[in-house]
Amino acid sequence: MSVFASLVERLAELLEPLFHASAAAAAIVLFTALVRLLVHPLSRAAARGQRARAALQPRIAELRERHGKDPRAFQQALLELHAEEKVSPLSGCLPGLLQLPAFFLLYHLFSSATIGGRTNGLLTHELFAAPLGGRWADALADGGPFGAAGTVYLVLFAVVAAVATFTYRRAKRMTAADAPVPGGDGPVPGLAAVGRVMPFLSYLTLLTVAVVPLAAALYVVTSTTWSAVERAVLYR
């Protein structure tokens, strides 16, 4: 943890001439961008996997017709087809899972009063008037939703809502485009419910931003925005 704290502090020092008192917040945004660059190859691989799964739809339709009265046989044949073509239905989850350690590191770093037996100096840093170790509840107690710190959260909520709406509309368009024609192939069994819920998950980011320390919220907002732009480019 102390090594990670030193990394954030070093990035903040490098950015201080440009961002002054908000240098630590800028360092978190830069750190998030670096993490996303590291997992970008996996995101590209996930996009290729989705295109490969789309190309398999005619063969899946044949399997569905052959095993229409035996769901278990269809599931087994489907798994064998994915294994044969080296396509995983869950490959798109890997980039998100690999980012969780970075998020939890930031969460713990800005929730700890001490690091390595020393006072955590990062808690004194702010994004404009909002402490990076504070939460929305703290901002509401100190000036209300339109106070100096509360306004910072309102801006973050607005960004998250805009990104979530963009993601939701794009997911709905993709779902409509991938809808099976009458007599054609339906969704992969077990993933249909996930497909219906996924467009709404982006709005859960609003809740995350509201309850985690501001530093972790910055990571979430930056990563979510990156994901929306990345997916729009990779899946166009």
Image (tube, helix red, strand yellow):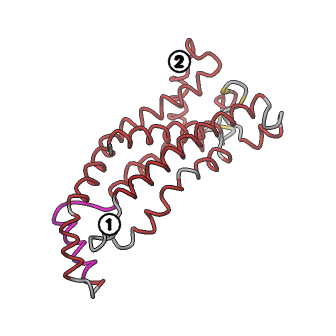
Mark 1 or mark 2: whose residue is earlier in sequence: 2
**Above or below: residue 234 compared with residue 75:** above
- Using the rendered view, name the quadrant where residue 16 is placed: top right
- Looking at the rendered image, the disc whose residue lies closer to the viewer, 1 or 2, is 1
- Residue that appears at 53% across and 41% down: 163
- Residue that appears at 34% across and 40% down: 40
Looking at the rendering, the stretch of residues picked out in magenta corresponds to: 73-90
- What percent of the width, then of the height, locates residue 207? 64, 50
Under mark 2, the amino acid is: Leu
Q: Residues within 10 Å of mark 2 (few under 14, many from 20)?
A: some
Residue picked out by circle 2:
15
> SS class of the residue under badge 1?
loop
Residue 118 on the magenta segment: no
**Above or below: residue 79 compared with residue 170:** below
- Marks 1/2 in contact by CB < 8 Å: the verdict is no
In this view, the residue farthest toward the bottom is: 69
Under mark 1, the amino acid is: Pro
Distance, label 1 to label 2, CA atoms, is 51 Å
In depth, the one of 1 and 154 nearer the eye is: 154
- What percent of the width, then of the height, locates residue 148? 77, 28
Is 28 placed left or right of 135 in the picture? left
Residue picked out by circle 1:
180
- Residue that appears at 35% across and 54% down: 92
